Image: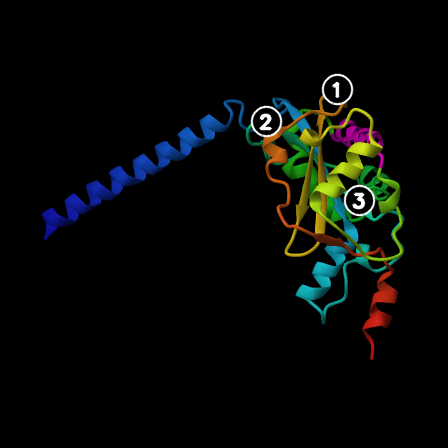
Amino acid sequence: MLAHRAAASRVFAHGLLVALWLAGGSAAAQDRRQNQPGKFDFYVLSLSWEPSFCDAVAERAPDQPPPAECNGPRAFPFVVHGLWPQYESGFPEFCQQPAPRLDRNAVASMLDLMPAPRLIFNEWEKHGTCSGLSPHAFLSTVRKARALVKIPDDYLAPAQEITAAPAEVADAFVKANAGLTRASVAVACDAKRLTEVRICIGKDLKFHDCGEVEQHTCRRAQIVMPPPQHGERKAAAAQP
């Protein structure tokens, strides 16, 4: 019995070592610079369609009050989800732990682009620390990257729900932005809604083709873009 247990233990240990080796090999294959601050190839600017986020939250928790960013006027349907350092294959994350402190005044200055303080803190810890920039410089880069992208006119303040193919959304951004190509844009969706448009931008803050990112674009035939609303209006509309 003891011999069997010892043999089983050796087999388990060998299997564990092989699994760890494979995991390490996979990480190395992704990029040898994995999680080294400042060592990446380009950024992904993720623009979230906030009405979709708010509708999804309401569906998941209909009896709960909406998040603050879903309960008031919203100037822009598209908000910045994040600016993500990216490798040509894969991406770094959580490159400095603990992360350098974000000043609350700096956070407050970003609320016109990223409407929730917790989002800004989370994005800095997970992605911003991989930029190799100071907190102030990273937030400044987020603002510059967002200013680079023009939102198509039809998506600035739609009064009604929009239904479109993901390719139509991508094409609208390409048409609105000189120098942007379809190889620089990915459209993300949930089961029925547009969730994000992701645009690849080089460290020089020029549009950057990114085949791996574009390959993950939404494959649904049609997606919807709910119109922006006040949270109060949503609550009133839900009442019988």
In the image, which residues are magenta?
A: 135-150
Q: Residues within 10 Å of mark 3 (few under 14, many from 20)?
A: many
Q: For this rendering, which residue is in front, 228 or 120? A: 228
Query: Where in the figure is residue 128, as x and y percent of width and height?
Result: 68, 33
Residue 146 visible in this rendered orientation of the protein:
no
Q: Is residue 174 magenta?
A: no
Query: Where in the figure is residue 63, as x and y percent of width and height?
Result: 72, 72
> In this image, 96 relative to 176: left or right?
left
Q: Which residue is at 21% across, 45% downward?
A: 9
The amino acid type of the residue labelled 2 equals Tyr
Q: For this rendering, which residue is in front, 122 or 172? A: 172
Q: CA distance from mark 2 to mark 1?
A: 15 Å
Q: CA distance from mark 3 to mark 2?
A: 24 Å
Q: Is residue 148 magenta?
A: yes
> In this image, 203 relative to 90: left or right?
right
| Snapshot colouring | rainbow
Residue 204, numbered label = 1
**Vertical side of 37 occupied by 72: above or below:** below
Q: Secondary structure at mark 2?
A: loop
Could you tell which of marks 2 and 1 lies nearer the N-terminus? 2
Could you tell which of marks 3 and 2 lies nearer the N-terminus? 3
**Vertical side of 89 occupied by 10: above or below:** below
- Pointer 3: what residue? 79
- Pointer 2: what residue? 87
